């Protein structure tokens, strides 16, 4: 009879410890996923902030004066884009650049789209 009780208790302990181990694993996995999400959120915010800053800087230091003098032609637009892209690339962390490469491929293509969207957004705000 004692052997039967010990076997039952041992079985119960094994089952409970299995459930506990599984719960701990899921908790650790959830914490790891939360940390990854937070890191991704920070990188996405960094890219958005850096894009806005680069476009605003280019407008303030280059575009506004050319528009005021009426000489903001296609060549000036290309130079403004190049200036914004250069400023953006130099301000992004390596983590942000790696994130873009891993998730979107070519960094220049991705940032071109971001700059164009930011220019459009800033034009709408100015209107």
Image: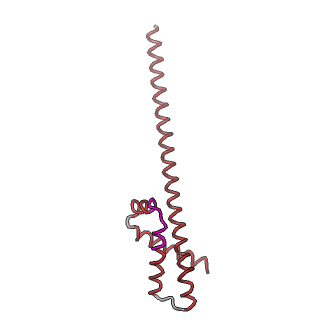
Tell me what residue is drawn at x 44 percent, y 20 percent: 11
Locate residue 106, reporting x and y percent. Answer: 38, 67
Is residue 21 or residue 52 the one in the foreground?
Answer: 52
Verify whether residue 28 appears in magenta.
Answer: no
Residue 108: x percent and y percent?
A: 41, 71
Q: Quadrant of residue 89?
A: bottom left
- Residue that appears at 52% across and 66% down: 48
Query: Which residue is nearer to you in this view: 36 or 117?
Result: 36
Q: Position of residue 103 (x, y in %)?
A: 41, 60
Q: Residue at x 49, y 35 (%)?
A: 24
> Which quadrant of the structure image shows residue 61?
bottom right
Classify 44 as above or below 27: below
Q: Residue at x 55, y 76 (%)?
A: 57
Q: Is residue 94 magenta?
A: yes
Magenta residue span: 86-96
Toward the bottom, the furthest residue is 70
């Amino acid at each position: 009879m004692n052997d039967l009780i010990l076997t039952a208790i041992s079985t119960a302990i094994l089952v409970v410890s299995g459930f506990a181990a599984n719960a701990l694993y899921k908790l650790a996995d959830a914490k790891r996923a939360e940390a990854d999400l937070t890191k991704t959120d920070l990188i996405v915010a960094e890219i958005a902030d850096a894009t806005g800053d680069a476009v605003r800087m280019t407008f303030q230091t280059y575009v506004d004066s050319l528009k005021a003098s009426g000489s903001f032609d296609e060549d000036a637009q290309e130079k403004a884009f190049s200036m914004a892209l250069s400023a953006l690339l130099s301000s992004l962390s390596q983590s942000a650049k790696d994130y873009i490469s891993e998730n979107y491929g070519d960094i220049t293509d991705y940032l071109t789209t971001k700059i164009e969207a930011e220019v459009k957004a800033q034009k709408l705000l100015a209107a």
